[in-house]
Amino acid sequence: MAEQMPVRICQVCAVEFTYRKFLAPLAAALSQHGYAVHAAFTPEQSDATLERLELEPIRFHPVTIARSASPLALARSIWDLWLLFRRERFSVVHVHTPVAAIAARIAAALARVPLVFYTAHGFYFHERMPWFQRWLHISLEALLAPLTTELLTVSTEDASLARRLRFKSADHIHAIGNGVDINRFTPPSAEQRQARRDRFGLRSDAVVVGTVARLVAEKGYGELCDAFAQLAAHFPQLQLLLCGSRLPSDHAGAVEQRIQQLQRAFPGQVVTTGSLEDVEAVYEAMDIFCLPSWREGLPYTVIEAMLTGLPVVATDIRGCREQVLPEVTGLLIPPGQSAPLAAAIERLLLDPALRLRMGARARQRALVLYDETKVLQSQLDLYGQAVAALKSRNQALLR
């Protein structure tokens, strides 16, 4: 009888925001394919979260996972997850986000969970990090690798890096990409575009450059504000549209004060929206999308902008340089510098034909590479292979 019960899977991440924004489609796809799917994260508001999600076929478990390096907080997270894993007897635990991935892999090993998937949504270490910090994060990944059955990366560059650093053998490292609902993000009609601009208080004749990102310094807001200030004094038709908010658990530097200074310096030219559920409306109001981040995995926002038919200006970092083809779908600029960012925006500002040409090619590229249906299917295939191999080794482990 136990052999006929569905395979039990738990998706683990640090906060509810990550689950809702990035993991919900995978959880739904797994459930539709007959798996018993659970999810564990720190809810924003426990009662509201459970009430909002209780109609889904996913079972949710509120746990405490602090987004910090505190040993005490990490120990508490390991303990909470160990209790959950022991109680629920999962066959697969799939971990996401840096701190949750550490705590959940240790807890899964202690609870003897048979299969542990780890998706690296962009390794935390990068080439501009001080060597000691970089070495520390690489060593931590190497230390936890034996606790990982399958290592998934969203970018091919991270997969290649994981192979070079020998985190796992090549057959257990998989570049899965990121996917977006291609029917949700589409180029707007002239009427739709005008309606979006009216909603956000943007001029119909403006050239709108914008971003969608959490309000933290590492997303490059400082450089974007500086670049806009350089340009706005000479191009009054330029407007800036910023969509995003700061999570309560964010530790990176805040940027609200810098944005407010820019709004005072250029009244009516800088618009902020906060976080929006219908974020597609923001892209539809833009002419140019910018993401001057210092560190990324394979950003969804770039994919969403590409599908909307926007040219993309992004930093030449892992993930972004995989998405943006320079001079074809957008422009790449060095991270942490406002002058090259301003030059890239100015070039697109002055050349409407180039914007349209790059945006059209960006959408074509996104349709081929970042269709959510294809990305989810690749993960379902990995689950199927891993579970089949587990069953062949020891059927009794599956409960």
Image (cartoon, rainbow, N blue to C red):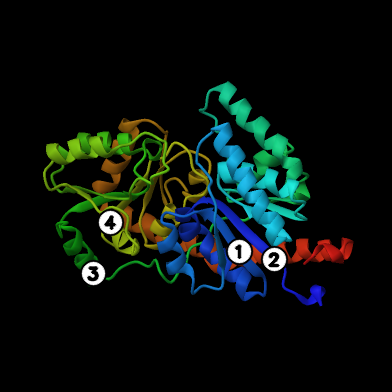
* Viewer-proximal residue among 78 and 301: 78
How far apart in space, not on screen, are marks 4 and 3 (Cα)? 12 Å
Callout 2, which amino acid? Answer: Arg
Place of residue 270 in the rendered image (x, y in percent of width and height, measured from the top left): 19, 46
**What is the crowding at mark 3: few (fewer than 14 residues within 10 Å), some, or many (at least 20)?**
few
Residue wearing tag 3: 190
Number of residues whose C-alpha sits closer than 10 Å to that of mark 2, classed few (under 14), some (14–19) or many (20 or more): some
Badge 4 is on which residue? Answer: 286
- Mark 2 lies on a secondary structure that is strand
Label 4 is placed on what type of residue?
A: Met
The Cα atoms of the two marked residues, 3 and 2, are separated by 48 Å
Q: Position of residue 156 (x, y in %)?
A: 61, 48
| Mark number, residue 389 | none
Distance from disc 2 to disc 4, alpha carbons, whole Å, reads: 43 Å
Observer-side mark, 2 or 4, equals 2
Identify which amino acid the numbered label 1 is placed on. Answer: His
